[in-house]
Amino acid sequence: MATNPSPQRDPANATVLSLDLDDTLWDITPVIIAAERELRAWLKRHCPRVVDRYSPHAALALRQRLVDAHPELAHDLSWLRTRTLEHMLEDCGYATSRAGEAFEVFCAARNRVSLHADVLPALESLHRRYTLVALTNGTADLERVGLARYFDHYVAARDVGAAKPDQRMFAAVEAVTARPAAEILHIGDDPLCDVVGASQAGMHTAWLNRRAEPWPGQHPPPDLHVEDMLALARRLLRAA
Ligand SMILES: [Mg+2]
């Protein structure tokens, strides 16, 4: 794949790697589907009136109404899920305190991810040379997914108060690492949230494109274009 940065824009000059998580290190869609299924099974067992009254479609519609009513909190998926559960429980005559139990069922399943085969060997070599930061719009728990030992910092939309491509997310990476954007390479699967967002922040960018999709032409291209994490590690460590 094409990798032709100018020398001053060479991503190998970075000292910090900022990594997206969902759909970069694992596929998230099957994980969320399984987590939703487990949550529903738990509700059916412990709070059956919720399942009787709220179809999956109705629960989604409720969640969307909450987003519409609280756009300032739409980036906070944990709040959104918990509030949706509280609303459904209350509506069906259950204690809202059970939302915490239900949400934990979802979280446990949400963190049972299947890492892509290239992830561990790549992180193993990259974390020896670079400061690694997880930068996510999602809610993955690095301890639970078994990757905490590779990462120096964790920055989530929930803590920042905004989601990528909002520039506050990238500023948070500069803040926690105390490094300027010019020393940071952000890697992610999403052309807009990851590549365009990081590029606007002045960071080096790598598009991790596992499905060999064409780059959306309306955006300036990334500095690096790689098919998986091992390709990224080879490119960076060879150049370093
Ligand atoms: Mg992603």
Image (cartoon, rainbow, N blue to C red):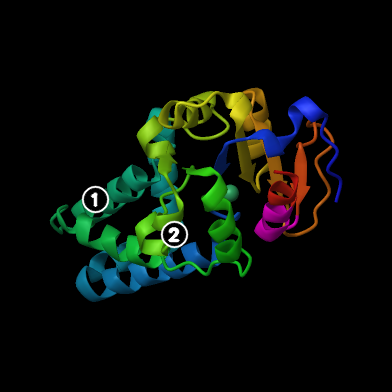
Question: In the rendered structure, does residue 44 fall within the stretch colored magenta?
Answer: no
Amino acid found under the numbered disc labelled 2: Leu
Give me the residue at 77% from left, 46% from top: 225
Q: Are marks 2 and 1 in contact (CB under 8 Å)?
A: no
56 displayed left or right of 223: left
Q: Is residue 20 visible?
A: no
**Horizontal and vertical percent position of residue 81:** 35, 50
| Residue 134 percent across, percent down from the top left | 48, 45
Q: CA distance from mark 2 to mark 1?
A: 31 Å
Q: Could you tell me the amino acid type at mark 1?
A: Glu
Span highlighted in magenta in the image:
227-234
Provide the major secondary structure of the magenta segment.
Answer: helix
Is residue 215 toward the left or the right of residue 23 in the image?
right
Residue at 63% across, 37% down = 185
Q: Is residue 119 above or below residue 1?
A: below
The answer to whether 161 is drawn above or below residue 21 in the figure is above
Residue at disc 2, secondary structure: loop
Of discs 2 and 1, which sits in the foreground? 2
Q: State whether residue 227 appears in this view.
A: yes
SS category of the residue bearing label 1: helix
Q: Work out which quarter of the rendered image holds the C terminus and state it.
A: top right
Which of pointers 2 and 1 lies earlier in the amino acid sequence? Answer: 1
| Residue behind mark 1 | 86
Left or right, 9 with reference to 87? right
The residue under the point 24% across, 50% down is 86
Residue sitting nearer the eye, 144 or 238: 238
Judging depth in this view, the residue of 13 and 27 nearest the camera is 13
For label 2, the crowd category at 10 Å Cα-Cα, with few meaning under 14, some 14 to 19 and many 20 or more, is: some
Q: What residue is drawn where x is 70% and y is 47%?
A: 236
Residue highlighted by disc 2:
147
